[in-house]
Image (tube, coloured by chain):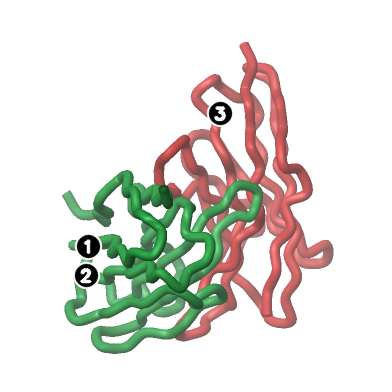
Chain colours: A red, B green
Amino acid sequence: AQSVTQLDSQVPVFEEAPVELRCNYSSSVSVYLFWYVQYPNQGLQLLLKYLSGSTLVKGINGFEAEFNKSQTSFHLRKPSVHISDTAEYFCAVARFKAAGNKLTFGGGTRVLVKP
Amino acid sequence: DGGITQSPKYLFRKEGQNVTLSCEQNLNHDAMYWYRQDPGQGLRLIYYSQIVNDFQKGDIAEGYSVSREKKESFPLTVTSAQKNPTAFYLCASSIDRENTEAFFGQGTRLTVV
């Protein structure tokens, strides 16, 4: 079984400042890794994903994440945030190349961008 | 436009009643999923279906039921057996059985009154 821990439940940040959201996972097998964003009362939108290959992954809206296998982490970063980045962010994992695969989510990190 | 449509967006239910949440997709995806979202708990899997006429229980299936009679539809019924049904429910579908990318609907907020 897999588990995901998002270390910060809330992250306040000023506009144009950088932000890092931390995600650690636990799994006995190789995994796929994902970051999703959720705006209030809406569904989830995929920001980026790591399936294989380069450990630095670039996504939409200027976000990027780095897969660190030794530390079992997949932290999300953005060098300069905007007010519109205020949302909740979810890290998720799925088993690598497994048919009938399921996503396991972390508890979410709420980002509040202040002017 | 291709996507996943959940309806209704808001739903109110009296205690003791069953209620069905709709989820329709026109992405031609085989796999579909139902999640429940509660504040601070992330998303928890209720049921999932990899193919028509087949579905499996997720982590919190008690008090819920589903059907998958058509590829594009995966309705969720919240039964009276579900002790705490007030939550935000999200439906998703995946481009493949490895779940390398999931697409989500806009959600249904269910409130028991």
Measured in 3D between alpha carbons, the distance from the residue under mark 2 to the one under mark 1, in whole angstroms, is 5 Å
Q: Are marks 2 and 3 in contact (CB under 8 Å)?
A: no
Q: Is residue A87 visible?
A: yes
Q: Are marks 2 and 1 in contact (CB under 8 Å)?
A: yes
Q: How far apart are labels 3 and 1 at the CA level?
A: 29 Å
Most distant residue in the bottom direction: B54
Q: Amino acid at mark 1?
A: Glu
Q: Of tags 2 and 3, which is closer to the observer? A: 2
Where disc 2 sits, the SS reads loop
Residue B33 visible in the shown view: no
Q: Which residue is mark 1?
A: B24
**Badge 3 density bin: few <14, some 14–19, many ≥20, Cα 10 Å:** many
- Kindly identify which residue carries mark 2: B73
The residue where tag 3 is placed is: A86
Q: Position of residue A50 (x, y in %)?
A: 57, 61
Amino acid type at circle 3 is: Thr
Circles 3 and 1 on the same chain: no
